[in-house]
């Protein structure tokens, strides 16, 4: 039966699984009519999608984000007995050539699970291809290493065992960040294809620490932010840190502006960010003004100029970025 249920905190691997399925079912030149994404639809839309009949010109793939139906939360979907029964019957009778992917992505660190007491989950567990994508811990290198090897193989590079260990030590366990580091290593190593530990030491930064910085700055926890920056600068060049922050705050500013008139899906398409990230950022930015985001973005740009021209030291620059009204 072409019904799939993907859930967990490791959103990057979920995205890859969906892309692989789309490629397998629809191929490269799929038509928009054959592929549709729904974000926690209401009951009628959800049930209608499950009961879709195949079209005469090929197979169909529906990706349905439905965490509100399977997770306990304040915004959970409320179903009466009749609606629950209808969904269960629809899960059991998905038509051939209509592939349904049920997505239950969980924010990293929340440690939630689909509610196994729900009748709709029990039905899905019986009839669907269920896959969990758990977030890895840095000490689970034995689980992360095979994934890194496969990602490297896709990029036509090879990792030595010590480079794998060092990548995980430096960059943490988030697969999306590790994949970004592999892209950098591929460019750095060209035309060579073998990645060494020395290469990792030279260009990879402490990924988990750097990804904390935007949140600390938004919360105005500047002392903690500077502690993280000091730690990162021991391994990374200050321009790399500035570049990351410039990109992060540009995306945050775009999200803040666009959210006034656009949906999270449209913002995702326009900015190239994953919709899951866009939704999280919209929530974070509720109490942050555009002026504050613009101040930080301009200070970052000015700091880059002053640093490159030798007018200021890196530590002083980061202090002024955070604490000064303007730079």
Image (tube, helix red, strand yellow):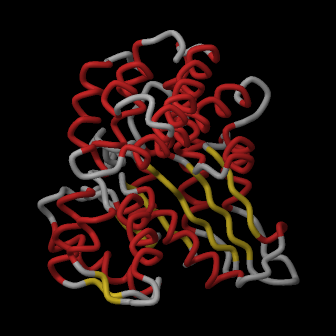
Question: In the rendered view, does 77 fall on the left or right side of 314?
Answer: right
Image quarter of residue 289: top right
Question: In the rendered view, does 124 fall on the left or right side of 203?
Answer: right
Whole-percent x, y for residue 74 in the image: 45, 24
Please report the residue visible at 59 percent of the width from the left and 42 percent of the height from the top: 82
Q: Report whether residue 241 is seen.
A: yes
Please report the residue visible at 52 percent of the width from the left and 30 percent of the height from the top: 300
Vertical position of residue 109 compared to residue 173: above or below: above
User: Foreground residue, 40 or 211?
Assistant: 211
Question: In the rendered view, does 239 fall on the left or right side of 20?
Answer: left
Q: Residue furthest front?
A: 310
Q: Residue furthest top?
A: 325
Whole-percent x, y for residue 239 in the image: 43, 46
Image quarter of residue 221: top left
Whole-percent x, y for residue 158 in the image: 33, 88
Image quarter of residue 181: bottom left
Question: In the rendered view, does 116 fall on the left or right side of 325?
Answer: left
Vertical position of residue 312 compared to residue 156: above or below: above
Whole-percent x, y for residue 98 in the image: 69, 74
Vertical position of residue 67 compared to residue 216: above or below: below
Please report the residue visible at 43 percent of the width from the left and 78 percent of the height from the top: 186
Please report the residue visible at 68 percent of the width from the left and 75 percent of the height from the top: 95
């Amino acid at each position: 039966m072409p019904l799939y249920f993907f859930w967990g905190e490791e959103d990057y691997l979920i995205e890859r699984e969906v892309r692989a399925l789309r490629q397998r079912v629809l191929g490269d030149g799929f038509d928009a009519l054959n592929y549709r994404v729904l974000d926690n639809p209401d009951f009628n839309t959800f049930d209608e999608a499950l009961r879709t009949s195949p079209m005469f010109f090929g197979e169909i793939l529906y990706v349905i984000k439905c965490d509100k139906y399977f997770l306990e939360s304040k915004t959970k979907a409320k179903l009466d007995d009749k609606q629950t029964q209808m969904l269960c019957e629809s899960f059991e009778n998905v038509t051939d050539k209509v592939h349904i992917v049920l997505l239950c992505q969980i924010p990293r660190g929340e440690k939630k699970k689909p509610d196994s007491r729900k009748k709709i989950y029990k039905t899905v567990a019986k009839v669907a291809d269920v896959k969990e994508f758990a977030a890895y811990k840095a000490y689970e290198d034995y689980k992360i290493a095979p994934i890194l090897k496969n990602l490297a193989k896709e990029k036509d590079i090879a990792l030595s065992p010590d480079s794998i260990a060092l990548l995980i030590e430096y960059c943490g366990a988030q697969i999306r960040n590790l994949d970004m580091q592999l892209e950098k290593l591929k460019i750095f190593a060209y035309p060579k294809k073998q990645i060494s530990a020395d290469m990792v030491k030279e260009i990879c930064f402490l990924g988990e620490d750097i990804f904390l910085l935007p949140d600390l700055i938004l919360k105005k926890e500047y002392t903690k932010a500077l502690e993280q920056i000091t730690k990162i600068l021991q391994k990374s060049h200050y321009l790399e840190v500035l570049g990351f922050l410039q990109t992060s705050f540009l995306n945050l500013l775009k999200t803040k502006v666009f959210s006034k008139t656009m949906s999270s899906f449209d913002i995702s398409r326009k900015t190239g960010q994953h919709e899951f990230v866009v939704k999280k950022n919209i929530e974070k930015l509720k109490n942050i003004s555009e002026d504050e985001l613009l101040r930080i973005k301009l200070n970052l740009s000015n700091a880059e100029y002053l640093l490159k021209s030798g007018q200021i030291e890196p530590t002083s620059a980061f202090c002024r970025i955070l604490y000064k009204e303007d730079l």
